[in-house]
Amino acid sequence: MSRSLNEVGALAKRAARGAGYSWGLAEEAGQATRWLCAQGLDGCGALAQLLRAVDGDPHGGDPHGGDSAARAPRIEGRDWRGEAWLCPLTAGAALSDRARMLEGGAVTLHAVAVPVLLLPFAAAAGRALGGTVHLRIGSGIAYASGTALYMDEPIEPGPADATVDLAAPVGAIRERQSRARMDDATLATLEVFAHRT
C-alpha cells in the first residue's frame, strides 16, 4: 500500500515512542524512516524490524529486551560498540552530533542492528560538514549527503559492522520518491507499537 511521506513519518514517530524510545529519539526515528522512504528504500520495514528487536521479540535477536543502555554506543576512540548490538537510532544520532569526528578519519560502529537506518544520520552529518559521508556496511557501500543518496547494492539487514568516513560520491544518485510503500505486515507491526503511545 502507498502512504504519503508525512503519514509515514508520523506513524514511525508514534511507533518508536510506543517501543520505549524518548520523544526526541522517536522524532529522529520518524525523520529517518521518512528519509529512507523518500530514497525508495523500505524505511518502514527497517523500523519495524528494529522495534521488534528492541521489544525483546525472540525473533528480533535482542537478549536485553528493553534495556536501551545495552544498545547505546560506548565510544572508544574510533570504535563504537554496544553490549549486545548497537541501535542505529541512538548510534546514528550520536554520529550526526559528532560529525566533526569524521574529519579525522574513519569511525567503525560494531554490530549495528538494521544498519540501513544509519543512512539518514550519515546524510545529516554530510550536510553539516558540507561533504559526503561514505558508509561500508558488510558488502554494501553507500554515499549520503543531505537529501542525496548514492547506492547501488542493498545494505544487509544486520547486525553488521559499519565503517563511516568522508569521501567523494561514486555511482548514480537515487531518484527521490514522493510516496512510501509498505506491506500489510509492516503496517500492522508499526500500528501495534503506535497504539502503545
Image (cartoon, grey):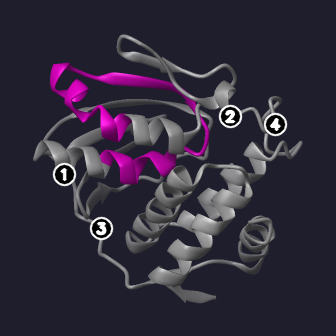
Rounded to the nearest angstrom, the CA distance separating label 4 from label 1 is 34 Å
Specify the amino acid type for callout 3: Arg
Please say if the residues under marks 3 and 2 sit with CB atoms less than 8 Å apart.
Answer: no
Front label number (3 vs 2): 2
* Res 65 label: 4
Q: Earlier in the sequence, mark 3 or mark 1?
A: 1
Q: Earlier in the sequence, mark 3 or mark 2?
A: 2
Q: Which residue is at 74% across, 44% downward?
A: 54
Reading the image, the residue beneath label 2 is: 68
Front label number (2 vs 1): 2
| 144 lies left or right of 67 | left
Please say if the residues under marks 4 and 3 sit with CB atoms less than 8 Å apart.
Answer: no
| 128 lies left or right of 123 | left
Q: Is residue 123 magenta?
A: no
Q: Does residue 85 appear in the picture of this structure?
A: no
Rounded to the nearest angstrom, the CA distance separating label 4 from label 2 is 8 Å
Q: Which residue is at 73% across, 60% downward?
A: 18
Reading the image, the residue beneath label 3 is: 174
Question: At numbered mark 1, what does the secondary structure look like: helix, strand or loop?
Answer: helix
Q: Earlier in the sequence, mark 4 or mark 1?
A: 4
Rounded to the nearest angstrom, the CA distance separating label 2 from label 1 is 28 Å
- Which image quarter is the N terminus in? bottom right
Q: Which residue is at 75% across, 74% downward?
A: 191
Please state the extent of the stretch shown in magenta in the rendering.
Answer: 95-122
Reading the image, the residue beneath label 1 is: 127
Front label number (3 vs 1): 1
